[in-house]
């Protein structure tokens, strides 16, 4: 059975401006992923710089940060089998022109900066990005009837919960 994982998604301002929110979120739902956390928000420059810290110093960094902070974004955590790699595949190559047909960036994008959506690229990134954007989400061992929040502690399900 596929390993149950959580990953982080961010719909960038362009996708929301163009009214593609339902379409993009719907793809993940229909694929069978469960939304664990979801919010529409503006992200500060400081948080955006932290999120994209690996790109600091690159020529596109300033444009990337300005674009990401230019309008509302939708941030989400999804859970499901091999969520990290499957979400990356659904999102497609960084440059929409190189993404395969059927990938979100290919189907709706043409510009590398305005490439609609971010998805964590590894287990380590997923952990870091989830903690950065959803610090209140309690990490649980997934796939044990997990739909946890601060309200439901999951103690009746005998699962491991640790607050970071
Ligand atoms: P990823 O989003 O596919 O993981 P990264 O290389 O991590 O791609 O880059 C982060 C984001 O920075 C991309 O999604 C894209 O919006 C932007 N970006 C990457 N390379 C370029 C570039 O060469 N020009 C402009 N923007 C870029
Ligand atoms: Mg990346």
Image (spheres, helix red, strand yellow):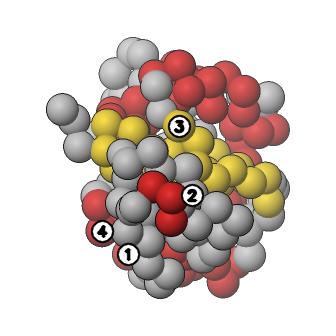
Image depth: mark 1 or mark 3 in front: 3
Residue depicted at x 72% and y 27%: 22
Residue depicted at x 63% and y 74%: 136
Left or right of 116, for residue 57? left
Residue that numbered label 4 is attached to = 124
Query: As displayed, is residue 1 above or below residue 57?
Result: above
Residue toward you, 17 or 38:
38
Q: Position of residue 112 (x, y in %)?
A: 49, 44
Image depth: mark 2 or mark 4 in front: 2
Callouts 3 and 4 close, C-beta under 8 Å: no
* Sooner in the amino-acid sequence: mark 1 or mark 3: 3
Give me the C-alpha separation between circle 3 and circle 4: 20 Å
* Sooner in the amino-acid sequence: mark 1 or mark 2: 1
Left or right of 142, for residue 47? right
Residue 54: image tag:
1
* Sooner in the amino-acid sequence: mark 1 or mark 4: 1
* Sooner in the amino-acid sequence: mark 3 or mark 4: 3
Any atom of ligand 1 within 8 Å of the CB at mark 1?
Answer: yes
SS at badge 1:
helix
SS at badge 2:
loop
Any atom of ligand 2 within 8 Å of the CB at mark 4?
Answer: no
Residue depicted at x 46% and y 25%: 32
Any atom of ligand 1 within 8 Å of the CB at mark 3?
Answer: no
Residue that numbered label 2 is attached to = 148
Give me the C-alpha separation between circle 1 and circle 4: 13 Å
Residue that numbered label 3 is attached to = 34
Give me the C-alpha separation between circle 1 and circle 2: 30 Å
Q: Position of residue 153 (x, y in %)?
A: 58, 66
């Amino acid at each position: 059975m596929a390993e149950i994982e959580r990953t982080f998604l961010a719909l960038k301002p362009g996708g929301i401006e163009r009214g593609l929110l339902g379409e993009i979120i719907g793809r993940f739902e229909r694929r069978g992923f469960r939304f664990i956390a979801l919010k529409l928000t503006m992200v500060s420059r400081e948080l955006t710089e932290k999120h994209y810290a690996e790109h600091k110093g690159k020529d596109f960094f300033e444009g990337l940060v300005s674009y990401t902070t230019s309008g509302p974004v939708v941030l989400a955590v999804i859970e499901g089998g091999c969520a990290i790699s499957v979400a990356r595949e659904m999102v497609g190559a960084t440059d929409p022109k190189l993404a395969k047909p059927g990938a979100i960036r290919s189907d709706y994008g043409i510009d590398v900066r305005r490439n609609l959506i971010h998805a964590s690229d590894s287990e380590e990134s997923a952990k870091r990005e989830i903690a950065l954007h959803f610090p209140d989400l309690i990490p649980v061992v997934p796939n044990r009837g997990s739909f946890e929040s601060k309200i439901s502690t999951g103690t009746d399900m005998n699962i491991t919960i640790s607050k970071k």
